[in-house]
Amino acid sequence: MQRQILTIFIAVLLIADAGIACSMLGRRRLPVMQLDLEIIASPADREAAAKQTTEIIERRLNALGVTADVKSQGNLSDGRIAVNLWEAPDVDRVKRVLSESGKLELAHVISYRCPTPCQTYPTKEEAIASMDKQGKIPADRRVLPFTDRATIAGAEAGNSIPTKWVIVESPAIIDGTDFRSATAIPSRIGLNDDYQIVFSLRKMGADKFGNWTAANINEYLAVVLNDEVKSTAFIKSQIFDSGEISGRFNKQSAEDLALVLRSGGLPFPVKIVGQSFFQQK
């Protein structure tokens, strides 16, 4: 009799546990919010770009430690991606990390050789005119803004400092596919909350870069981030697999940029076109 009562008691507990589990499943917690992203690309490129962009965004969110679901909205050819966030992180930071293109390149600057200072131009038009009087940019050249440390420091101090422009060779010597790692570290200059990013290259990129630097001693090299020249330097000796990016980054902006570079650059620009919050039950 006691054994029968014990069996019935255990069965009641199992049924109760099952009921609690069903109740919890029925009240599954909703995501905190959803971000709607759109890939800026031609219809012919969107399907492949959507797949690659989804993978890159997942890597960036994982690196941030953010729990999220990333999936395409509608057909891949629509170029729309939904990001469901299952917690309430720093939303502005997440948006910056997701929309940052992360396009990093090392490019040859068209300039006189060192020790002559690196050639810069006060306007984009003057830079173009130095190559072509008709105002056309040759296919193997790019004209890019140069935001060096002095320009950034002057802007922060409220001074009016004209933008510089430089001409770089196209294609770049090294692009995003060649980078292996990136890490934010305090700047060697010693300013408070001033950081830089050190990076290393994959073997194929390192070999390519080593060959180019060996053949171009005293030529100028540009570190180009998102189509802006962040710094220039002349080649003193052969360089293989490492370098640095300076630009008056604070700790968080440097860490976020290093995260983006490690995760890979987006194949096409992405913009955030909507966001919605879910009411938790």
Image (cartoon, helix red, strand yellow):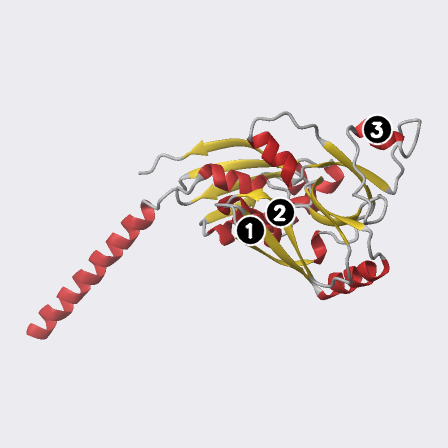
Given the image, on which type of amino acid does mark 2 rest? Ser
In front of the other: 242 or 275: 242
Q: What residue is shown at x 17% (from left), y 61% (from top)?
A: 12
Image height of 217 relative to 145, above or below: below
Instruction: Give how far apart the Cα atoms at labels 3 and 1 are.
Output: 34 Å
Lateral position of residue 242 relative to residue 5, left or right? right
Residue corresponding to mark 3: 126
Badge 3 or badge 1: first in the primary sequence: 3
In front of the other: 106 or 10: 106
Could you say whether the residue bearing mark 1 is in a helix, strand or loop? loop
Instruction: Give how far apart the Cα atoms at labels 3 and 2 are.
Output: 26 Å
In front of the other: 193 or 167: 193
Given the image, on which type of amino acid does mark 1 rest? Ser
The disc label shown at residue 187, or none: 1
The disc label shown at residue 145, or none: none
Could you say whether the residue bearing mark 2 is in a helix, strand or loop? strand
- The percent coordinates of residue 96 (x first, y second) are 54, 39
Image height of 206 relative to 54, above or below: below
Could you say whether the residue bearing mark 3 is in a helix, strand or loop? helix
Residue corresponding to mark 2: 246
- Residue 241 in sight in this render: yes
- The percent coordinates of residue 107 (x first, y second) are 78, 48
Lateral position of residue 146 relative to residue 16, left or right? right
